[in-house]
Image (tube, coloured by chain):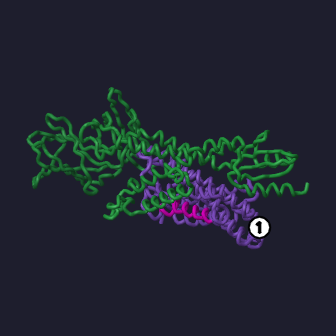
Amino acid sequence: MIWRLLRSAAFARAILIYLALFGGAGAWAPWTQAEGGPAPAWASTLWLDHPFSSPWFLAGVAALFASTFACTWGRRARIAGLRRGVLPPGAVTLAGDEGPLRRFLAAQGFRGDGAVLHRFGTALWAGWVLHVGLLVLIAGVFAQQALYDQGTFILTEGELKQLAQPDAILMRERGRLGPVDPPDLAVALEAFDPTRKQPGYAPDRLSELRVFKADGAVVADTLDRAHGIEVDGVEIYQGIRSGLSVVLDVRGMGPRAVVLQERHHREAAAEVLDLRGRPVRFVVTTERDLHDVSGTGRTLIRLEHGSQELLLSPEAPFDFGGTQAKVTGLRRWGSFSYARSPGMPAVHLGFVLILAGCALLVLPAGVAVIESAGGRTEARVQLQRGRDLLEADWQASTTEPG
Amino acid sequence: MQSTLFWAAVTAYAVATALGIAGFAFSRERWLAAGRWVGLGGLLPHAGAIALRWVEVGHGPYNTRYEVLSAQAFLLVAAFGVIALVSRHLRSLGAFVMPMAFLLMGFGVATFDTRREVPIIFKSWWLILHIGFAKLFGVTVALAAICAGAYLWKRRRPGSLQRLPDPPRLDLYAHQFLLSAFLFLGVMVAAGALWANQSWGRYWGWDPIETTSLVTWIAFGVILHFRVLHRWEGARMAWLTLLAFAFALVTLYVVAVMVPTIHNSYMVGP
């Protein structure tokens, strides 16, 4: 009963229409759009705040998978039979002499010398390949969603960061079966230009990275937002966000980067705890816009603690919670992300199969079987489309003078 | 020079439109043929205008409404030229293709003077595939809609549009173009996903245009199911083909204009 339901065209159609309507509504829902604001309470109550990871959508995709599987199961034998000349009852029958019939079918694109002729015989598999591709794609996406691991991190120019260290990764997301720990890599930002002009493109970020693998091997590469770099199955991408960091040399601790966030177009600040655990704030004001392509111009660095304010000069020591520190530089920071995507090969294979199926669908496949009995010859023809036209063209060709 | 070439192409498409409509209205084969040749002749200055803009801005025609729509019109007319060469039956479709090209040019002209640098993420071969197949998708779905529209017209008024093929053949052509559009849309979506993965490490972000493209692909799948499994054809399929065309318009143009998406740049303009 359930198998019959899953195999029915009506069920497949209903699922596709459901997914199309759901997808359409999800795409236009204000809270799913950029700057669309938070989801309303009713949407959260119905688990629709993230519509495409909601149970409603996932159930639809699961039903699509089940329906596609049921429709595809057993179809291979039928197609193989069709190729051998086992035609369904709805095939067109053309009656006439064998010679003209063969010539007519050849003109229609049918090839072969025996009793069974084919037109784009491989394309008979179009629907099957497309459906198998859909199954592989859905399975690949689920595998990818279960196994993926991604996160973002910030690096200041000259900084080296172990990704597996606590607090190194911000906004980490991973699938239920994804790796527990972040990648065992250390990444150093050798140089960073947030407004590098590459010929033909608007100014954008460009980084020079060195990635240290667990075995000590080093990979050095240049990174922009067009392409990630891959090291041991981990892809590293350039993010959009960038800003200024105050680099400190704290006695006994070595260099430390304080990542500042933009407060307005000529000021950036960060609140941190000094070595006594008191909240202090580093504030940088600039002569020009923080993102000015020609640079920020003259900068002032202040350290604020309550109502106290201290102007910091480069290399001049200051008290940082009982320990001496000095500002060694003002540098740029850039944001990066890493991704581990073990499900992607299956996703790619799904794409390839779906597109191969779609490409085969375009070809007008057909099978013709020529049968002679009792001095009468018939061609039974199975076409994916245009049966009536074929019949009409045959009638027209037999009534044409000459 | 670029402007002169552009307006020469617009004029050619306008004249071709007028000749095509008059040719059908008065059943004059010569006017139809003249319209076809004038329209196809417009490809030459049009190619020049596109090439000059390409050289000037340093990237292909895929950023700003003028570049996108002008290239779409060019491909539509060029595809019609190829089809007219291959199939005599479809030559008279020029009378429907030229007005579409003319309208696309008209919609794009408002942003003729807008020039934008492209962001660095456009540095990708997947982008070329994504955009190339988006344009082919637009062309083939438009041709499917033209065939479906002509089918419906001829079915109601059997004596009219005699230069066009019989309704059953128009129905078959519409289906064939729809299948091609289904393929091209599939490649567009897949290439876009692979491009996103290359740039950002995620192949799908449920951006409004991504989602609408997927919905359109599913809608095409439903429509093709009706044809293949339920043997729907004729008027019902023609209406469904026009519905598919509406889906395509929403995907390619309406969402980019009306909804904030990562794809806004390609339809940028007043």
Q: Quadrant of residue A173?
A: top left
The quarter of the picture where the C terminus of chain A appears is: bottom right
Q: Residue B173: where, in percent of width, then height?
A: 69, 58
Stretch of the chain drawn in magenta:
B239-256
Is residue B20 toward the left or the right of residue A207 in the image? right
Q: Residue B245: where, in percent of width, then height?
A: 58, 62
Q: What residue type is labelled 1?
A: Gln
Inspect the magenta stretch and tell me whether residue B252 lies in it.
yes
Q: The green chain is which one?
A: A
Q: Is residue B264 visible?
A: no
Would you place residue B236 above or below residue A174 in this image? below
Q: Residue A164: where, in percent of width, then height?
A: 28, 36
Q: Which chain is purple?
A: B
Judging depth in this view, the residue of A263 and B228 nearest the camera is B228
At x 51% / y 41%, what residue is drawn?
A: A349
Would you place residue B245 above or below residue A156 in this image? below
Q: To which residue does mark 1 refer?
A: B162
Q: Residue B201: where, in percent of width, then height?
A: 41, 44
